[in-house]
Image: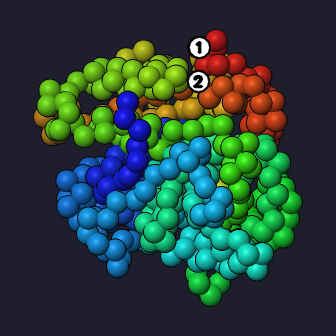
Amino acid sequence: MAELKTLNKKQIIDICYGATFLGSGGGGPFKTGNTLIGTLKIKQGKSNLYDAVQTLVNNVFRNLPEDVEVTVKTVEEVDDHVGLTAVVAFIGSPNAMLQLDNVDPVIAAFEKLNDQLKLKNQRIGYVIPVELGALNSIVPILVAAQKEIPVINADGAGRAVPSLTTTTFGAADLSANPTILAKSEKKGISVFVETAAEAESFVRPVLEFFDEQAGLAMWAMDKETLQRAVPIRGTLQLAQEVGELFNHTAIFPEQSVEYIIHAIVQKLNEYGWQAAPVFAGIVQPPEQKTQGGFDYGTVILRNEENQQEAWIYNQNENLIAWNPQKSAPIITAPDSICYLYIDRDLNGSVLRVLPFSNADIIPLGIVGKMAILIGIVAHEEWQSNLKLRNSFMKILADLGFRVPYKPFPEW
């Protein structure tokens, strides 16, 4: 496969689709990720991709040429003479992020971090996603476009994650000093802490005063530190290639549900990721609450033919899929629990198969639609790094699930 070197506007839309799927229900809502790129009309559960592609313009790419492309670099291509690599993202409640229409809070956080680095004769030369998800895969690309710097083809998790502690940056014990949280150019905080856990402890309570979401910039790394902290690579390209599969009129004129699922699984296998569908059912009205910068919720899929159900519990991201018939897990984090839904016309014919996040279920009208759960076995770094695995085990235990981790086919 050809290595991704630049991103044009269509490819950014592809990443939004692919990262929505790969984000395990989190990483920011698909609706928001598209809105940040340009105007997206969402009506009766349908996202008008072609209108979105044609209206990808100036509210984010503001003063840049219409044909601008964002430079993409691998971890190996980073040059310390150009500058450090910083993590930029939105942090907080995905439901709160549904209201976003620009990346100004993240730009503000980026600039404040850059100002502090200048005091040490350093600067930010690259940006990298904190995780893989519809919003937080897109945000660094948009920051890179505005600042005319490259984005790194990697991220800190290979999925979306509920906490800074559940990233490879956190597991690598990088200093989180400073961590910048910004609501706007004039409103934010700079936190001087050392660990990801300390950063979480300071940042989450502040989000209550920032309407549950804010821009984040932290972990400014030289190349040696970046190489140590980012073992999960190539994920922007993976998201782009998976996302391209959903553009069915260009690729699958005679698309079938089974065909696109097979194509997605095959694409993941090409990247060494094991995946398989595990359950299909009708989406029931979700239970959801926002507290402390997190969305907590339960999504139930019901197979109306055999009355079987799958219960998916989330803390922003899907953390465990539960089989109530057997009182046992179907999949547990760090494996990814990913959604697709089948969009049909009034006659019941399949129009498209689309990804969604937990924050999209109500806005996109997915209640009552057929959805398919696809499990993805966690990246080998999650398998081998006990600190990373335990970070998820603790969150699951806090939610009341004291279960061991097994790759999902073993359940």
| Residues under numbered marks 1 and 2 in contact, where contact means CB atoms less than 8 Å apart | yes
Residues under labels 1 and 2: Cα distance? Answer: 8 Å
Q: Amino acid at mark 1?
A: Pro
Which residue is most to the front?
Answer: 81
Which residue is most to the top?
Answer: 410
- The correct choice, above or below, for 191 with respect to 249 in the image is below
Give the residue pinned by disc 1: 409
User: Residue 45: image x %, image y %?
Assistant: 29, 49
Give the residue pinned by disc 2: 377
User: Residue 402: image x %, image y %?
Assistant: 80, 29
Write down the quadrant of residue 383 in the picture: top right
User: Disc 2 on helix, strand or loop?
Assistant: loop
Please give the name of the residue rendered at 32% of the width and 65% of the height, measured from the top-left corner. Answer: 68
First of labels 1, 2 by sequence position: 2
User: Residue 273: image x %, image y %?
Assistant: 52, 24
Q: Quadrant of the C terminus?
A: top right
Residue closest to the eye, 237 or 299 = 237
Using residue 196 as the reference point, say whether residue 97 is left or right of it: left
Residue closest to the eye, 143 or 215 = 143
Q: Quadrant of the N terminus?
A: top left
Using residue 132 as the reference point, say whether residue 257 is left or right of it: left
- Total count of labels: 2
Q: Amino acid at mark 2?
A: Val
Please give the name of the residue rendered at 41% of the width and 38% of the height, measured from the top-left corner. Answer: 3
Residue closest to the eye, 47 or 106 = 106
